[in-house]
Amino acid sequence: MTTYTHGHHETVLRSHRWRTVSNSAAYLLPFLGPEQRLLDVGCGPATITVEFADLVAHVTGVEATDGAVAIARERLAGVANADVVRGDVHALDMPDDTFDVVHAHQVLQHVADPVHALREMARVCKPGGLVAVRDSDYLGFTWFPACAGLDLWMDRYQKAAAANGGEPQAGRRLLSWALEAGLTDVVPSSSTWCFGTAEDRAYWGGMWAERVQQSALADQLLTSGLATQDDLDLMTAGWRTFVNRENAWFSVLHGELIVRIH
């Protein structure tokens, strides 16, 4: 595994808890049914996982650390058809052909070998089942108006993610990774998150204004010399300006794949 660039600070978990099936896995919804077993790789705080539990027979979440597993289990407490296990997507401790659907949201951008991870996801998926992946593409992000603080944020995030062995442009590479993994029945797509209303700007910009000061990303930037405290302050000021401008707009591009396993 790579080093997880974002870490698990409250500001990061706030972002993860915002995610739902409708805003993060809508491309998969038409393929889900009540008889299926679903594996949710990198389930985070399980806000998507718990909604999957309403749509399929059973869902299993996977997280890489004990702490992340505990957070997911807290969200799934009392959900009879859901469980969470610790595991590594490069070496899932599960038999071949176990699940009808294997899903991962914002995972492949952080792993050491996304091609091998896709092969593992396909291995535990039944013939005729689906592997579904969605990842953002940071250089596909766009915003208005121009902002020096946000430009600096993007530049430093790219450097930090690369230093950790990740691929922040995963969205555009999903199809090539799937084909390299030997997966042939692949349907690619893309979708966006858009933050343009006052409420959405307050959530997205407010979260990042804090995150560039307090999260694992902030610690890495400072300790590695990739940024100074003045740099972090400029990023925070940029995000706060974004929140307060009524004409401000931010779009997050995602790549998506539906892969049929044969």
Image: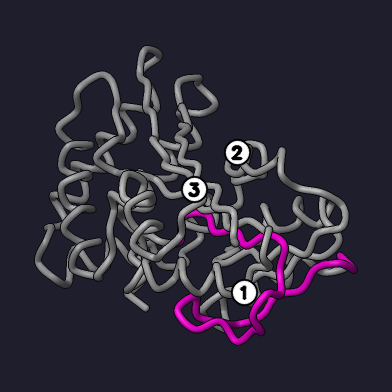
Per the rendered image, the range of residues in magenta is 79-107
Q: Position of residue 121 (x, y in %)?
A: 54, 69
| Residue type beneath disc 2 | Tyr
Q: Residues within 10 Å of mark 3 (few under 14, many from 20)?
A: some
Identified by mark 1, the residue type is: Val
The residue indicated by pointer 3 is 186
Gap in Å between the C-alphas at discs 2 and 3?
13 Å
State if disc 2 and disc 1 touch (CB < 8 Å).
no
Q: Residue at x 45, y 21 (%)?
A: 196
Residue 59 falls left or right of residue 207: right
Please tell me the numbered disc located at residue 124: 1
- Please tell me how crowded label 1 is: few (under 14), some (14-19), or many (20+) other residues with Cα within 10 Å: many
**Which residue shows up at 15% across the image and 47% down it?**
155
Q: Residue at x 80, y 59 (%)?
A: 36
Residue 234 is situated, as x and y percent measured from the top left of the image, at: 18, 41
Q: CA distance from mark 1 to mark 3?
A: 17 Å
Magenta span contains residue 251: no
**Location of residue 117 (image quadrant):** bottom left
| Residue linked to disc 2 | 27
Q: Nearer the viewer, residue 168 or 205?
A: 168
* Dot placed on the residue nearer the N-terminal end, 1 or 3: 1
Q: Is residue 191 above or below residue 12?
A: above
C-alpha span from label 1 to label 2: 21 Å
Secondary structure type for disc 1: loop
